[in-house]
Amino acid sequence: MRPQGLLWKRGASFLALQSVAAATAFAGPTSVTKNQDFNFGRVIGGAGLSGTVTITPSGSRTYSGSAVPLGSAFSAARYTITGTAGKIYTITLPPDFTINAGPDQMTVTALTSSIPLTGAIPAGGVLPFSVGGTLNVSSVQRDGLYGGNMTVTVK
């Protein structure tokens, strides 16, 4: 039995989530592949505790407010762009997305990339990148395994 207010998150480009699948957009020979989901880890929230948990594109985790992340299992989402060297790419991240556990929801905001959103594919045609974001935990958040989808496109 988990303590009251304990949120499980991972997977879905997160949280004890499930998969946050990347949508793949093609522009000629360019594609994007999801290699790792977000994982915000276990978080104590609810029961009057609220705040944010942020995963940076480099994979570090910070928190604010009274929400407290537990354990050491967490990660940024990771992707790989493949295409013709020198071809210009444009990454589009959503402004936010929602994760759910039944009727309960949390929002992930402030999505950021480890590389510029527009650039050129390097020699070799492979460009890995990571995405970080902020999980918003409310003071009435209930325990659960939260999951959702985040769409990342590359043109």
Image (tube, rainbow, N blue to C red):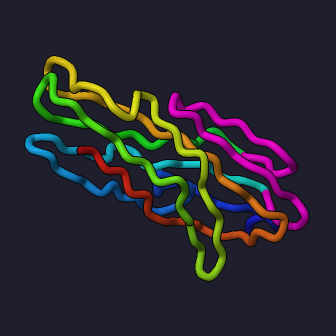
129 or 92: nearer the viewer? 92
Q: Residue furthest right?
A: 48
Q: Is residue 121 visible?
A: yes
- Say whether residue 4 is magenta: no
Does residue 141 lie above or below 39 as drawn? below
Instruction: Determine whether, in the image, residue 25 is placed left or right of residue 115.
Output: left
Q: In the displayed structure, would residue 113 be above or below residue 24?
A: above
Q: Identify the magenta region.
A: 45-69
Q: Residue at x 59, y 74 (%)?
A: 101
Q: Position of residue 94 (x, y in %)?
A: 46, 54
Residue 114: image location, x then y, percent: 45, 29
Residue drawn where x is 33% and y is 54% of the image: 22
Figure check: 45 above or below 121: below
Identify the residue shown where x is 71% and y is 36%: 62
Point out residue 23 in the picture as x, y percentages from the top left corner: 30, 57
Q: Residue furthest bottom?
A: 103
Give the x, y percent position of residue 69: 73, 46
Queried whether the magenta region covers residue 64, the answer comes back as yes
Q: Is residue 152 left or right of residue 85?
A: right
Pick the residue in front: 71 or 94. Answer: 94
Q: Quadrant of the N terminus?
A: bottom right
Q: Nearer the viewer, residue 70 or 61?
A: 61
Quadrant hosting residue 99: bottom right
Residue 75 in sight: no
- Numbered circles on residues, count: 0
| In this rendering, position of residue 28 left or right of residue 96 | left
